[in-house]
Amino acid sequence: MNNKSKISELMRNPSDVWIFLKTQGGLDTKVYDASLVEELRSRLSLPPTGDFENLLGTEDISIEDFVTAFFQTIQPYAEMMADLLRMFEKAGAKQTDKNLAILFRFDQNLPELSFDLSHFRDWLETWTRVIGRYLTNMWNYDTLWALNKVLSEWDWSIRLRDAEAQRWVSEYLEQQVWPDFSLSAPRCDDSGLDQRLNRAWRVWRKVVEESSKYDRDRDVLRKTAFEQPTDLPSGDLADEHREDWSPSLLGRIDSDHWAGSFALGAYHKAETLSVLPSAKRRQRASELRSSLDDVFERVPKVQVERETFIRELQEFLKLPIWQRRHELYSAWISTQLLDALEGTSVRIHQVGGTLVFSFSGTHLATADSFDPRLHVWTELRSPLTAPVGKGRKKAIQPDYSLITDPVTSPEASILEVECKQYRRPSRRNFADALTDYARGRPNALVVLVNYGAASKSILDSVDPSVRDRTSLIGEMRPGSKLAQERFRRIVKEAIYRRYGLTAGMDVEQMHISLSNIGQIHLSWGALPPDLDLYLRIDAAAMADEIYYSHMGSMDKEPWVQLDTDIQSGPGTETITITRWINGKYHCAVHNYSKEPSLAGCGAHVTFTCGREQRQFQCPLEGTGDWWSVFVLDARTGKIEAINKIVHRPW
């Protein structure tokens, strides 16, 4: 089989393909698509400065690699379309012809986009088909390990000179997590080898990117992998048998620390080579180049004929949904909001068989299981005196509002969501939006979600009087599981603040940042007279239990201390954690008095860490002398809310 792609017959280099994409696809690289250019730079390991088009013509990047990187960069939009299709189908389920019409009026400066469900399915099929051809995984279990063998290092005691790379390897190995930051490709000052290291690093980055989608905790992927069929493909298999980036493939290579040994070895080899004498560096670099080339030759290339390539690209770039992709993101956030309301009898509203997203405000959905009812509105406008945000005049209009009856009252809002698509966050813009929306909706939590990164330090610029009700989520897009889970938690927290924990919502899992001292605060009334706060710590190196007869210490291991033992209510007890150990913290409350029972006693536990806070109310039902409150995994920041009355807590 001829494995060489014929794409190269179309144009001389990636720069020519880029010009084609700009002219045919209407890319606005100065404003709306600037983030796309930055992400392409990162995926292709190009310098952060310098003319992008010129770099594509001078760097050693194949056309195949460039096309793959381009479609990887826009792949989240395909996943947004799939999520929107599910929502559209749900909204149209009661239609006789099942062909719901959809109307976008999100931007008052752009023409309307109107289509029906069948058209949207066709667009998604075209998008998926074209992108899928270029995102096919051509790597399998054998070739991934062959690449690892060339670059890996298994002596974990090695310390890298690059501090960020060392931190990545340490978190990966010691904390057993996927670090939440990326690494650029290592360099050794040998241009030929650096080019091949860039190519190898793109494979490493893809593996890490796909693996971390399952959970930050590496163990989640490995458990998923071994629940899948284990007959992995190897060797030069036919295309129909080639392995995708499945949990089976990713989990099985991660069980042997593929990504960690690869990163450690690649950086260590580059750092070692860079200090060798010139002659020895050239010799060793030549050997590594040859070994890497041998591996790359074993990996098939995407085969696409010239005419097919041009036709498919033109077909893709002319899709109406591609041309309006920037409005797609804001619409996709509505699917995440409605997913968080799952199980609450949500009705998605239509007007004459049409689902409308309007800049002037739309009543999108209603959750009937709440009392009062809970509504989802888009672009709900309300007055505000002296807004600080640029462009706002006497009013605010957030992208989404969760609001109870009466919807005309700003005080009835429980959550405001604003959507941004910045590759780099605008500190002033983001902070002003959060300030204005929190002032204008005085009882609501306010969250700003951004397609690109967003530093939590931006919250420091929010008006202090409303800052505690504001949140910021960066990298909120398909595939960013942690960001999506955090958004879901904020929706649940808003509902809890208004309706209480038992408001028909599944609030079992939440995430919290453990960068500060933590406190667990128990408070209760006169009865039962004697409740005791317990915290059990389970870690690889130690296990401990903090309670009234073993109150712990804040100055030495386990760095946890109970303040007092109240034996006659009403009372309060507090446990303080000054340093976090990589393990699990299980919080429970014991009814030492036995009578009356815990059920319905009104006791509550508050967990605080920095500005983040979680509250738990003692259940109304249950038998036993123990209230199992929550389990916190310090490696990932995940809190599992147990919230049950039991006979034994652990």
Image (tube, grey):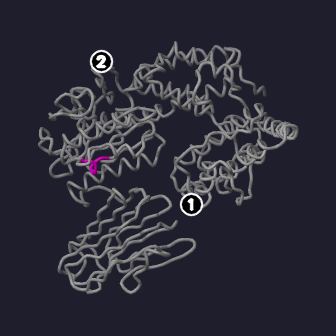
Q: Which residues are magenta?
A: 466-470
Mark 2: which amino acid?
Asn
- Which comes sooner in the sequence, label 1 or label 2? 2
**Where does the image place residue 409, in percent across and percent down from the top left?**
12, 41
Q: Is residue 255 above or below residue 558?
A: above
**Residue for badge 2:** 109
Most foreground residue, 37 or 226 = 37
**Where does the image place residue 220, in percent across and percent down from the top left?**
54, 57
Question: Does 337 appear in magenta?
Answer: no
Q: Residue at x 69, y 15 (%)?
A: 12
Question: Does 467 appear in magenta?
Answer: yes
Most foreground residue, 50 or 91 = 50
For the C terminus, which image quadrant? bottom left
**Where does the image place residue 161, in percent across and percent down from the top left?**
68, 50
Mark 2 is surrounded, within 10 Å at the Cα level, by few (under 14), some (14 to 19) or many (20 or more) other residues, namely few
Mark 1: which amino acid?
Gln
Taking the image as shown, residue 472 lies to the left or right of residue 25, namely left
**Where does the image place residue 550, in percent across and percent down from the top left?**
41, 84
Mark 2 falls on what kind of element?
A: loop
Taking the image as shown, residue 84 lies to the left or right of residue 147, namely left
Judge whether residue 505 can be spotted in this image: yes
Q: Residue at x 35, y 80 (%)?
A: 647
Q: How many marks?
A: 2
Taking the image as shown, residue 282 lies to the left or right of residue 643, namely right
**Residue for badge 1:** 175
Most foreground residue, 282 or 74 = 282
Judge whether residue 625 can be spotted in this image: no
Separation of residues labelled 1 and 2 (CA atoms): 49 Å
Mark 1 falls on what kind of element?
A: loop
To which quarter of the image does residue 396 belong?
top left
